[in-house]
């Protein structure tokens, strides 16, 4: 007989126990251990499962809007798996989201995580979209050196460091700029031609003008690729930097960042990637780190999924599914 599982709101004194099994979940590490303290301070819900007084599971609910809940970071101690801990945590998250007035809950699940998929499906979640993930390691060297993404046919040029950060130009007049609130409708209209959801760092929301404005207000960096006429040709959600030992390369400390939901035509995507390579390389060099890795994800089957490999990205052998539950 399995011991009783109690699910309750998280507390600061849970953090050290939770970090013991949320720091190295994957080959590259895990983000949850570092996020726990922030999650406790944020207005979302942090749920903890305990068995005999010991914290053995955790998940977090982020409220992207008044009616949109995002479930993330569910982790269960290896010694307490297959006991229903994940199901109990998810049920608590659903109940809490309903009590807050949310109308829909979403979660991202790896395509090969069949147990989580089965558990989510049994509760009522259904898959609504699919993202493919790519990555590339940046070569060592000056941040100003041209990288393979700067193909000769495009002749991408970058302005001096002293100029406005975030702008690159190519011979077609593509400029990569931080999205302004006034340009949000233009970006959303263009993105909706190929995307249903936009976001990064394991958080995606249904694409809408209000949603992107909320992203900007929350400090999410959304980049737009604009041509000389002012038309938006592509865009991406630029994630937060994180530094982890890369266990695939002997624990080499690596700064990583993600281009989320990247979309657009080929010149736009090339300009966005080249801009990100320069910014990430500058971050690596400034912080004195030996390595940098750039991730990118895009909706499966879109033009970006065929362009990224031509820019030196390798598929990550994983697909992310976005799952949804009407509350």
Image (tube, rainbow, N blue to C red):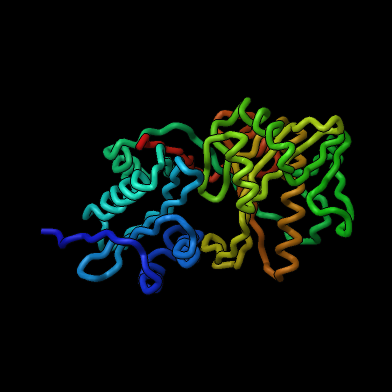
**Which residue lies most toward the top here?**
193
Residue 63 is left or right of residue 314, and the answer is left
The percent position of residue 27, horizontal first and vertical second, equals 47, 59
The answer to which of 11 and 98 lies nearer the viewer is 98
Q: In terms of image quadrants, where is residue 104? A: top left
Q: Quadrant of the C terminus?
A: top left
Note whether 167 is above or below 282 in the view shown. above
The percent position of residue 192, horizontal first and vertical second, equals 61, 28
The percent position of residue 312, horizontal first and vertical second, equals 68, 44
| Residue shown at 74% from the left, 38% from the top | 182
Note whether 17 is above or below 220 in the view shown. below
| Residue shown at 71% from the left, 34% from the top | 234
Residue 57 is left or right of residue 30, and the answer is left
Residue 324 visible = yes
The answer to which of 89 and 243 lies nearer the viewer is 89
Q: In terms of image quadrants, where is residue 279? A: bottom right
């Amino acid at each position: 007989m399995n011991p009783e599982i109690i699910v309750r709101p998280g507390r600061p004194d849970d953090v050290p126990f939770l970090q013991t099994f949320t720091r190295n979940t994957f080959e590259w590490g895990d983000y949850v251990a570092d996020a726990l303290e922030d999650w406790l301070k944020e207005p979302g819900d942090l749920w903890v499962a305990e068995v005999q007084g010991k914290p053995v599971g955790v998940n977090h609910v982020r409220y992207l809007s008044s009616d949109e809940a995002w479930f993330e970071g569910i982790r269960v101690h290896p010694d307490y798996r297959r006991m229903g801990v994940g199901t109990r945590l998810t049920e608590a998250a659903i109940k809490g989201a309903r009590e807050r007035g949310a109308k829909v809950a979403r979660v991202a699940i790896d395509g090969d995580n069949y147990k989580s998929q089965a558990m989510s499906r049994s509760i009522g979640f259904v898959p609504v979209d699919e993202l493919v993930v790519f990555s590339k390691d940046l070569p060592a060297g000056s941040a100003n050196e041209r990288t393979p993404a700067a193909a000769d046919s495009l002749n991408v040029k970058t302005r001096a460091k002293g100029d406005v950060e975030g702008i690159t130009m190519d011979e077609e007049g593509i400029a990569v700029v931080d999205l302004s609130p006034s340009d949000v409708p233009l970006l959303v209209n263009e993105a909706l031609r190929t995307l249903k959801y936009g976001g990064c760092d394991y958080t995606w929301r249904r694409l809408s003008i209000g949603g992107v404005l909320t992203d900007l207000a929350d400090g999410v960096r959304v980049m737009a690729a604009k041509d000389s006429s002012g038309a938006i040709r592509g865009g991406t959600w630029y994630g937060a930097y994180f530094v982890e030992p890369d266990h695939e390369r002997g624990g080499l400390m690596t700064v990583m960042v993600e281009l989320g939901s990247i979309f657009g035509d080929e010149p736009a995507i090339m300009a966005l990637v080249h801009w990100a390579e320069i910014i990430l390389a500058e971050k690596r060099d400034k912080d004195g780190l030996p390595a940098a890795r750039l991730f990118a994800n895009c909706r499966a089957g879109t033009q970006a999924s065929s362009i990224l490999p031509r820019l030196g990205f390798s598929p990550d052998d994983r697909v992310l599914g976005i799952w949804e539950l009407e509350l």
